[in-house]
């Protein structure tokens, strides 16, 4: 999950968006596929000191991985139906 820390650090260093992230005009939503990922992401954000400094919404929701799984399931059903 170090990529989240890298992403936030990079964006906070960009001149235009850094101040808007820091003053709360912009926030980020981070969606996790399950409770384990959610706990890992929250821990990483806490270690990086991002909570309290940035507007962050972190929760369980659809991700690229869950969408891919869903689409693959429908392809298998469609193929089976013929």
Image: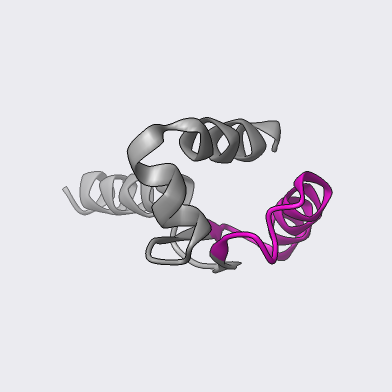
Q: Nearer the viewer, residue 29 or 23?
A: 23
Instruction: State how the image is colored.
Output: one colour
Q: How many numbered tags mark residues here?
A: 0
**Residue 3 pos. (x, y %):** 61, 32
Relative placement, left or right, of 5 versus 68 is right
Q: Nearer the viewer, residue 68 or 11?
A: 11
> In the rendered view, would you say 38 is above or below 1?
below
Quarter-of-image position of residue 34: bottom right
> In the rendered view, would you say 15 is above or below 27?
above
**Residue 79 pos. (x, y %):** 23, 44
What residue occupies the far left of the structure in this picture?
82
Magenta range is 31-55
Whether residue 38 is visible, yes or no, is yes
**Residue 69 pos. (x, y %):** 43, 48
Relative placement, left or right, of 11 versus 36 is left
Whether residue 69 is visible, yes or no, is no
Residue depicted at 64% across the width and 60% down the height: 53
Residue depicted at 39% across the width and 61% down the height: 26
Q: Is residue 67 magenta?
A: no
Residue depicted at 45% across the width and 44% down the height: 18
**Residue 77 pos. (x, y %):** 30, 53
Quarter containing the N terminus: top right
Q: Nearer the viewer, residue 24 or 67?
A: 24
Q: Is residue 37 magenta?
A: yes
> In the rendered view, would you say 60 is above or below 14?
below
Q: Nearer the viewer, residue 38 or 72?
A: 38
Residue depicted at 74% across the width and 58% down the height: 42
């Amino acid at each position: 999950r170090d990529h989240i820390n890298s992403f936030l650090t990079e964006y906070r260093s960009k001149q235009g968006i850094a101040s808007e992230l820091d003053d709360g005009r912009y926030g980020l939503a981070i969606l996790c596929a399950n409770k384990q990922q959610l706990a890992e992401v929250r821990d990483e954000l806490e270690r990086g000191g991002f909570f309290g400094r940035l507007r962050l919404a972190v929760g369980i929701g659809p991700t690229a991985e869950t969408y891919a799984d869903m689409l693959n399931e429908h392809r298998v059903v469609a193929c089976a139906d013929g």
